[in-house]
Amino acid sequence: MTGTAVTFPRDLKYTQEHEWVSVEGNVATVGITYYAQEELGDIVYVELPEAKKPVIQFAEFGVVESVKTVSNLYSPCSGEVIEINKAVVETPELVNDDPYDGGWLIKLRMSDPRELDELMTSAEYEEFLEELSQGASEPQQG
Amino acid sequence: MTTVSADTQVRQTPLYQEHLKLKARMGPFAGWQMPLVFEGTIKEHQSVRTGVGMFDIAHMGVVEVRGPEALAGLQKLSCNNVAALKPGQTQYNMLLNERGGIRDDILIYLLEENHYWVIVNAGNVDKILNWFQATLPKQAFYRYLLHERVPFAVQGPKTLALLQTLFPDFPAQLKPFHFEWMTLLGQRTLVSRTGYTGEDGVEFFVAPDILPVLWNMLLSQGVPACGLAARDTLRLEAALPLYGHELNEETLPIQTAHAWVLKWQKPDFIGKSALLAAQKTPGIQLTLVGLMMEGRAIAREGYMLQEGGTVTSGTFSPTLERPIAMAYVDPGYATLGQLLNVDIRGKWQPARVCTLPFYRRQKI
């Protein structure tokens, strides 16, 4: 189990759908969180948009599939796709092994950086996960 | 006084606490709280294909049927020939409805004359108990052995060698689809050379209290715990049908890859006349095929085919490292190499009809 510092990097912002975004100038790099890849299990397929495709904040931009399930990807911010991570398309398990670095998914040229204010900080995301786990506590036997 | 139906409770197996200790990902399955994943589905899958792995399958129902009319009753309710069983043998069989549809697919164990165990799918236990109540003859008595006999699976090519070293009493000469009694941790235990992974292995039927002891003993020997997710990828590679997916009350055995269970020479069994009628109108029923996807997107349960038909199970095959699926299609398309198109999120993705099973173990 990886420590908290690695699980919720402080320099990232987070969505309720468990994507992260890191920002450099007006370029946003997007991936899914450690928690998301843990929940999904072995990731075996990643479907990403083509370059130049416009994406809209909180709208679907792609799909990840694990052995067991399909999950939509939602963009943390609006903009235009400038690059996709070809390595994860070829080797989807990179998302499991290295969700915050080698397992990034797309880079966007942001159209409205103010949208980032609507995302969670690492502390807020950690709290959000805490609430999630309490909401989904083990069912008790009657 | 109010009674709570067993259906509305979430049941825990005798290994529930062990699963929590291992931090298994738990999930509901057929009214039970079951472990889905321990260390990772692909890793667990490969352990079973190359070595050994163990599965909590305590949710499966063990129903005893005995009495002077036990054989007669099971012959009428099932379509395979129960009379062919010798004591110590196990048979794959199906219970049908009057329309010839599949109520459940089962294993039948003959312990001694007119004394059987019927292993039913977890999701069908209540239905089958009701069906036995309504249909078995007066002198055939059934009993759900929930608190007495718990099924537990150890699977993989190294299973038998390991169990022989651990338990001197283990029947080393046990043949596939046979079972024997042995003493395991001081308890009389039934062990059968059966499974649901396409790999060699055994299933134990143990007293509930010794199950955690057995589990921890095997864990300490390095046997990895495997979840239901790996059980599903393993059985799918082996093209073993799963009730509720490939089989249901509307599917006829003649549509499946297991039409061999039908023994027409039996004088009568429930569903026989409906099946005979259905056979006289060929071409109307869809037939089960294996699909190998050309691309990497997975065709999952419920996805439609452009040429007609539906996917019943689909996953990523850890052994073949590509997506596989089973689907019911028009018999006209059920030829090897036939190109079909699956609707995956609004796009037609090509797939080819292939031979089943997807994986067959090397016989030694």
Image: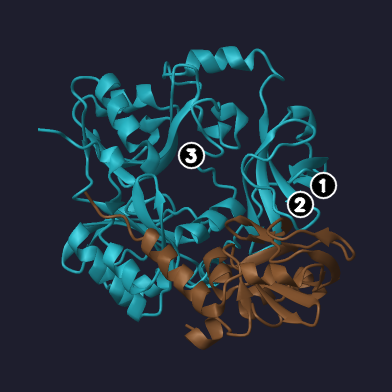
According to the colouring, which chain is cyan?
B
From this view, report whether residue A97 is shown above or below residue B94.
below
Q: Are marks 1 and 2 on the same chain?
A: yes
Q: Residue at x 67, y 31 (%)?
A: B287
Residue identified by numbered label 3: B243
Who comes first in sequence, dot 2 or dot 3?
3
Answer above or below: position of A31 versus A141: below
Q: Earlier in the sequence, mark 1 or mark 2?
A: 2
Cα separation between marks 2 and 3: 23 Å
State which quadrant residue B277 falls in: top right
Q: Read off the residue under disc 2.
A: B293
B110 relative to B260 in the view: left or right: left
**Tag of residue B254:** none
Q: CA distance from mark 1 to mark 2?
A: 6 Å
Residue in front for this viewpoint, B114 or A108: A108
Residue B117 is at least partly visible in this image: no
Q: Secondary structure at mark 2?
A: strand
The amino acid beneath tag 3 is Tyr
Contact (Cβ within 8 Å) of mark 1 with mark 2: yes
Residue A103 appears left or right of B134: right
Who comes first in sequence, dot 3 or dot 1?
A: 3
Q: Secondary structure at mark 3?
A: loop
- Check the rendered structure and report the hue given to chain A: brown
User: Is B34 placed left or right of A13 in the picture?
Assistant: left
Give me the chain letter of mark 3.
B
Q: Is residue B8 above or below residue B315?
A: above
